[in-house]
């Protein structure tokens, strides 16, 4: 799940009181990544307009980059469009930036697919 938050540092602190641990604190870049066991939660300060379901094949369970994940994600990007679904946002299929795209489920809710890599 990716949440739209007002402040990453405040949201990180709040999420820790609920039992989550910070996997990657990028609050200076308006992003945070939390874990509670195998469950991942990300927060974006002003970077997304609504909460959304997120798929992130890029990081391991301990928020470390997985080799080849971005290439695999770029290959996944073509599937929704090939099935007749549109992508609201995407980073393109080339280059070295983390791959990401947003599509909408049949219910109209946004679904983010992203290859998170720490930007430290």
Image (cartoon, grey):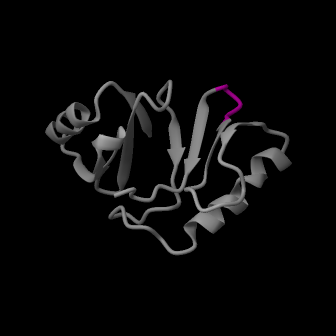
Q: Position of residue 91 (x, y in %)?
A: 65, 48
Q: Quadrant of the C terminus?
A: bottom left
Q: Quadrant of the N terminus?
A: top left
Residue 6, quarter of the rendered image: top left
- Residue extending furthest toward the left: 17
Q: In terms of depth relative to the viewer, which is nearer, 18 or 56?
A: 56
Q: Position of residue 25 (x, y in %)?
A: 27, 49
Which residues, given as a range, are shown in magenta? 104-108
Q: Residue at x 59, y 62 (%)?
A: 96
Above or below, comparing residue 66 to residue 47 in the picture: below
Q: Residue at x 71, y 31 (%)?
A: 106
Q: Is residue 69 magenta?
A: no
Q: Report the side of 90 relative to 69 (left or right).
A: right
Q: Main secondary structure of the magenta part?
A: loop
Q: Residue at x 57, y 73 (%)?
A: 68
- Residue extending furthest toward the bottom: 67
Q: Residue at x 41, y 33 (%)?
A: 3
Residue 71, quarter of the rendered image: bottom right
Q: Position of residue 94 (x, y in %)?
A: 70, 60
Q: In terms of depth relative to the viewer, which is nearer, 112 or 20?
A: 112
Q: Report the side of 100 relative to 21 (left or right).
A: right
């Amino acid at each position: 799940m990716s949440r739209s938050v007002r402040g990453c540092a405040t949201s990180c602190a709040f999420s820790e009181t609920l039992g989550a641990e910070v996997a990657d604190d990028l609050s200076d870049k308006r992003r945070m990544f939390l874990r509670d066991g195998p469950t991942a939660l990300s927060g974006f300060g002003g970077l997304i307009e609504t909460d959304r379901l997120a798929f992130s094949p890029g990081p391991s369970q301990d928020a470390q980059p997985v080799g080849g994940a971005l290439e695999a994600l770029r290959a996944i990007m073509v599937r929704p469009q090939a099935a007749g679904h549109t992508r609201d946002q995407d980073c393109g299929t080339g280059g070295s930036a983390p791959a990401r795209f947003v599509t909408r489920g049949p219910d109209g809710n946004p679904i983010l697919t992203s290859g998170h890599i720490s930007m430290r």
